[in-house]
Amino acid sequence: MNDSLAYLLGLLCARGHIYPASKRIVIEFAHKNKTIEGIAYCPKCGEMATSPSGKDYLMCKNKSCQAIVDKSVKPVYEQQESTIVSLKEIIIPFLNKNINANYDLIGNEHITCLIIDFQDNETLFNEILETMNNKFGFDSFEIPAIIYSTSIELKKEFINGLLDAAGFFNSGGWYPRNGQNSSARMRAYFQIVRNWNMPVQICNFLKSEFKLPIQTIDWGHPNIRDGAMKDYFESNTSSWSREHQVKFLPEYYIDYFKLRLTHKQKMFEELATHNKNAIFDSDEDCNAPTTITKKQLKVYHKEENSKKIPECTRTHCDAFWQVCANMGCKYAVAELNGNKNYYLTGIKNCLNASEVLKNFDSIRKFITAKSIESGMKLIEKKETKERTIIRTNPEQQLYKPMCLYLEKFLSEKYKQEVVVHDTSAFYLDKFIVQKGLEQEFEFCDNFKIKPDIVGFLRASKKLIFVEVKDEELTIQSIGQLLGYCLVAQPEEAILVSPKEPNMALKMLLTADSSFLQYGRDLRIKIATWVDNKFKYLEY
């Protein structure tokens, strides 16, 4: 173990991929926006200035001042170019000091990838793969065992790697706290994508090895991320599952860790300096468990039992630390010591636990009913809007009769239960969850596609895609459906219109129809809609 390798292992756990066949490691460095803004201060009183909701200007947060502040006072940090320069001039030389490999960069305006080629150093590559327990991606990696037994300096380098690739520093991450010189406290966080084990491991590692506090973990769990089920109805049924955020206060970390991405280090320093100057009187360590209050109670979310959640925490949670305990946080587990009532209430010696829990259940049921009521009104409003569109859109007028025809036709053809839906207004993965089909069709979890009509063969767990046009079919008509088919490999795919293909498409199909192929023995079918049924054209 050396500093370069410890740092690389941190990068891997944050945003790394291992490709055994090509002997390569790829690290992602995200820079979603070209620039990111720092903290704005009022030139009159020195308090922080923020944008009031819906406004395009800054206002001092000091209630006795409330001066309008020019946006130009905000420092601006360039991200993309800084990432590339930092990789070329700082990170790659640091890694290359001890890791003999070939280094390259690829990327676009949103992400830069560091490619490390070990074809000339297979021994080290295999050692790294073994160190990562023969896992291949950051969504399944765990902190390597060797890191726990190495020196404090190498442990720092491991965290430096985590921070460079998964650390986020943003002036918008403040939250209200009364310090001596400011009413806003800055937070930074580790962004952990899809990996449910890593948040607790990072938290426990920082506490045990550095005695550093973690303020909270914002889990990608439906009760924690979407506690009122608002996003579920308003935008995205699974928006809760995007990521986990391990949040920390930068002033306690700045003296231990140093980032090699220049713009991130500058933002890190800016947030830490703000908090130090503000003078807060508490490290705000999570100190879990804490008492669960009535205001903290969450609705019984429809996604609590989603297969995206590990089975150990596939349950209702009112507090983030309950998820932590379920995921094995050694501090929470030790404190709870198997006391179920303590876990459910946050009260160590709860004398009337049954009464408290009964009251909790009553409140949850009430707020859940209110949430569903408002959500159904929103859905009804959306459906009314969609019906209006259908009445004026000749293509969408075809969906309902086609669904009715296909449901009967496919059930007879495949000798099993088939349900057919108009999916044109939804991404397929979200539609499946909304209709309660996720158990049979969990493999569709990442299908960000919008076929017009989908048939679901429930026993065989297969899909039928139908793309509908109300005009002559053209060569261009095939492109979108072919793309969907390459992603999802449906059992059948049908392109249909009340009108026959135009002459150019007919000529092409007659000459060579191989471009309809999307899998072995799978090809798009061309049909016309005649007398409320499909008439297939042979090519």
Image: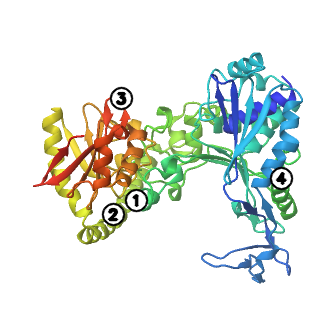
Q: The disc labelled 3 sits on which kind of residue? A: Arg
Q: Earlier in the sequence, mark 4 or mark 2?
A: 4
> Is residue 129 something that shows in the picture?
yes
Q: Earlier in the sequence, mark 2 or mark 1?
A: 1
> Badges 2 and 1: C-beta atoms under 8 Å apart?
yes
481 shown above or below 490? below
Question: Of circles 4 and 3, which is in front?
Answer: 3
For this rendering, which residue is in front, 452 or 344? 452
Task: Find the distance from the CA under tag 1 to the CA under tag 3.
Answer: 39 Å
Q: The disc labelled 2 sits on which kind of residue? A: Ile
Crowding near the residue tagged with mark 3, few <14, some 14–19, many ≥20 C-alpha atoms within 10 Å: few
Mark sitting on residue 62: none
Q: Which residue lies under the disc numbered 1?
A: 233
Task: Find the distance from the CA under tag 4 to the CA under tag 3.
Answer: 58 Å
Mark sitting on residue 379: 2
Q: Which residue lies under the disc numbered 4?
A: 251
Judging from the image, what secondary structure is the residue with disc 4 in?
A: helix
Scheme by which the image is coloured = rainbow
Q: The disc labelled 1 sits on which kind of residue? A: Phe
The image quadrant of residue 34 is: bottom right
Q: Which residue lies under the disc numbered 3?
A: 520
The image quadrant of residue 53 is: bottom right
